[in-house]
Structures are given as C-alpha cells and as structure tokens.
Image (cartoon, rainbow, N blue to C red):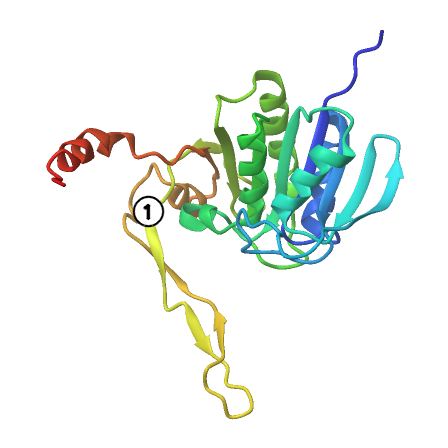
Amino acid sequence: MEKKKPLILISNDDGVMAKGISELVKFLRPLGELVVMAPDSPRSGSGCALTITQPVHYQLVKREVGLTVYKCSGTPSDCIKLAKSEVLDRQPDLIVGGINHGDNSAINVHYSGTMGIVIEGCLNGIPSIGFSICDHSSNADFEPLGAYVRQIAAMVLETGLPPFTCLNVNFPVVSKIKGVKVCEQAKGRWTKEWQPCPRLSDPNYFWLTGEFQEDEPENEKSDHWALSQGYAAITPTTVDVTAYGFMDELNERCNQIAF
C-alpha cells in the first residue's frame, strides 16, 4: 500500500486572500497534501479567541490535486478547531500559521492570531509552526523566505517537537537572510498605544497603535536582536504557562495564610 503524504493544515489571521498565505502554500506544496482553512477576512490581533456568540460557517474555495482551500467566518483558532473536527479525515501531521504580514516576535506572541493557530495545534498534540515577516505591506516580498520555510517545516515533519512546544519563526525584511538563530522572546511592553480619532465631535474614539519598548535591546539571545541583525529568529514556545520557578516560594507564602 502506498504511504500517504504528510497532511499539512494551514491557516492565518490576515484572511484567505492575503499574499502571505498564498506564498506559504507555494513553499509547502512539495512537502505533502495541503488543506487551508483560513478566515474570510482579516482577524489580526485575535490571539486564541473563539466565536461563541454566533454560528461559524465555512465554504469551499477551491480543490485541486494536493491542495484544498476553505474560507471560514470565524477566528484563526476556530479555523483549526473546525477543520480538525469536521473537515479532515485524519489527524494533521503539521499545522502551520502564516505567513503573517507583520512580526510576531517578543510579547506579540500573546496577541497574535497567527500564533493562536499554532497554540491550538500544540494543545492538540500536533507539531505546529508560526511564520511571520517584519513587513505589514500587503505586497511584502516573501521570496527570500521560501527555502527557510520549507526546510524548517520539513525538519519538524521529520523529527517532531516536544509536547506542548511549538515554534514561532520571524523573518527580517532583507534581500538575503544571514541564517537562523534560535532565540528567546525579547522582553518589553507596548507604550503610547492609543491614537485619538474623534468622530462627530465625540472625542472618545481611538485607533490602537503603539511603540514597543524593549527592556534589553542589547540582548544577543533575543528574537528582536536576531531580526535587527538580518537573521531569521526561531523561538521555541511553550503553551504551559506555569511559573515553575516560583512554585516553591509561593507555596511557602501560602502556608502563612491563616483561616
């Protein structure tokens, strides 16, 4: 019996028509059978959000040899849940989010719909990768990323990932990427996050914007530093958010609580 090709489930948060997901499909076609289930319109910043106040609908966009594409009215995480439960006839061998227009390094991982896809896969025990480029342009140049995307995905298909661990991969905007660096998440926070945009004499309207304030800009282990130097940054990311290093101290503190 002929061995089945790996099944790769793909989604994004920029919408099914975004250039980034089309480029991702192109890069991954040689690796297996692809199924795309992506939002029908942009859902950036949706994190791991789920649609619980209304039904979610999906629709076939196209089907050809080795590729099936659906669009979905829900969030990126909805897309993975729905595809896995109602569309696919077997467990995916790999789940991939992206390629996102805009980077998801540092604390952006907590807001990212792209990484919401990856975390949903990871929670279900499926090796999962998120790919992003530091370019918000709708016509960003993804070509320098192709060989890296394909080789990283092939590596994960072959060797897997530890339980509850996924990969957050970010690419710089350069004509030639210097290589890859395995990084830690840069520490920092967003500041100056709201820009006023008054409407009809009402001043209480704002656009979300912001500037990222990095705590350790010279940290050569961080994803921000690697990207600034022209490297692709690969951050192994765990979905177990337990602060294990604080457990003993917290236990001692709690032992002092009297009732």
Q: Residue furthest right?
A: 64
How packed mark 1 is, by other alpha carbons closer than 10 Å (few <14, some 14-19, many 20 or more), is some
| Vertical order, 16 against 250 (above or below) | below
In which quadrant of the rendered view does residue 143 lie? Answer: top right
Q: Quadrant of the N terminus?
A: top right
- Secondary structure of the residue carrying numbered label 1: loop
Residue depicted at 45% across the width and 75% down the height: 195
> Which residue bears the numbered disc 1?
187
Q: Is residue 195 visible?
A: yes
Q: What percent of the width, then of the height, locates residue 206? A: 48, 76
The amino acid beneath tag 1 is Lys
Pick the residue in front: 161 or 51.
51
Q: Is residue 179 visible?
A: no
| Vertical order, 229 against 46 (above or below) | above
21 sits left or right of 210 in the view: right
Q: What percent of the width, then of the height, locates residue 162? A: 48, 21
Pick the residue in front: 258 or 37.
258
Q: Quadrant of the C terminus?
A: top left
In which quadrant of the rendered view does residue 40 lie? Answer: bottom right
Residue depicted at 58% across the width and 56% down the height: 44
Pick the residue in front: 32 or 151.
32
Q: Residue furthest top?
A: 1
In which quadrant of the rendered view does residue 93 lie? Answer: top right
Pick the residue in front: 18 or 233.
18
